Image: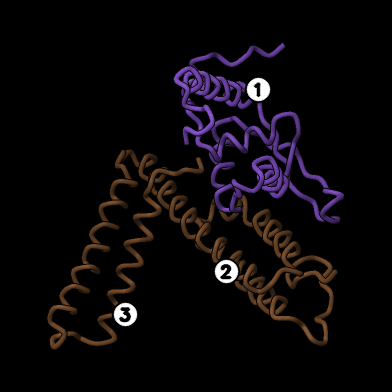
Chain colours: A brown, B purple
Amino acid sequence: MRKPVGCRGDAPEPRNPPATFHILMVWSRVYPFLLYAYPPTFRHAFAVEMTQIECDQRRALEDAPWSSVLAHMLTVLADIMTTAGRQHLESANEWLSTVGANRNVRLVGRVTGSVLFGLAGIQVVYDAYVPTLSMGIAAWLMTLMTGLAGAWLLRAARPARGA
Amino acid sequence: MPRPPSSDAVDTFLPLSPVVFHILASLVGEARHGYGIMQDVAARTDGSVRLGAGTLYGALKRLLSDGLVEEAGEGEDPNLGAERRRYYRVTALGVAVVRADARRMAHLVRLARSKQLLTPGTA
């Protein structure tokens, strides 16, 4: 059986690789960069093991249809984004406690996320209500980024199910 | 002979989240590496609980710092090739905590049974 690129003992690329192989190859290149979403201490402790696990999972998906690989990628991406946000909040909490401040970073994250998400919502309503005053694609992109940042913060600041 | 953990020390960790319960239960009696824990949890729950690597290591980080889990050295998994992997095992405190949580849930099940909440047809 072929081994996906990025794992030890990689096999050469076959002559007519299926779509799954190409997607896995791209994913194996992207995955290490996604781990930079975590704080350095977490990455230092667990990045090697997480990469090993991803490699094992890719190996198990080699004969799966490309849609399964895509679903796996989206699941992993959502998992990394959520847990990386939580780890950053925990790191911020630890840092604050070392300097003697006992602020609830989770609450701050939740409030900031709500504000950002709310601002994006207001912008959408305003643009829909007064389309002639819309600032065009740049404003919509800004709105999208603000909304995504708000949603990410809100999700990260939720009470953790995992720990 | 090591003293068993006090009930006060155990109670501070209860109730466990489902993810933490599954991780600790998976490590009881056998040291496992990360992928081994993920596979074991998926197998024991018939695939209904699938841990992501980020979720697993986020929980493991907390469990390690709380002293419920400890590293058990590195080794190869014959089923997964020659790569060395870090193994984890549950501590005496971890066993006491997961046992206490299992007892807590068993008590809830008994309560649900006494109220006939678990009889067939009462979804």
* Up-down relation of residue B63 to residue B107 (above or below): below
Q: Are marks 2 and 1 on the same chain?
A: no
Query: Which is nearer the eye, A16 or A108?
Result: A16
Tell me: B58 left or right of B85: left
Of the two numbered discs 2 and 3 on the same chain, state the one appearing first in sequence.
2
Report, in whole angstroms, how far the alpha carbon at label 2 lies from the one at label 3.
Answer: 24 Å
Could you say which is closer to the camera, residue A130 or residue B31? A130
Q: Residues within 10 Å of mark 2 (few under 14, many from 20)?
A: few
Q: Residues within 10 Å of mark 3 (few under 14, many from 20)?
A: few
Q: Which mark is residue B4?
A: none
Identified at 38% across, 60% down, the residue is A152
Q: CA gap, disc 3 to disc 1?
A: 53 Å
Q: Chain of mark 2?
A: A
Residue at disc 3, secondary structure: helix
Answer above or below: position of B115 versus A42: above
Is A19 on the left or on the right of A76, as rendered? right
Relative horizontal placement of residue A152, taking residue B102 as reference (left or right): left
Cα gap from disc 2 to disc 1, whole angstroms = 37 Å
Mark seen at residue A141: 3
Q: Quadrant of the N terminus of chain A?
A: bottom right
Do labels 3 and 1 touch, CB within 8 Å?
no
Question: What chain does mark 3 sit on?
Answer: A
Within 10 Å of the Cα at label 1, are there few (<14), some (14-19), or many (20+) other Cα atoms? some
The residue that label 1 is drawn on is: B92
Task: Evaluate whether label 3 is on the same chain as label 1.
Answer: no
The residue mark sitting in front, 3 or 1, is 3
Instruction: Give how far across and how far down residue B70 sits, in percent.
Output: 66, 34
Which residue in the structure is indicated by mark 2? A33
Disc 2 and disc 3 in contact, CB within 8 angstroms:
no
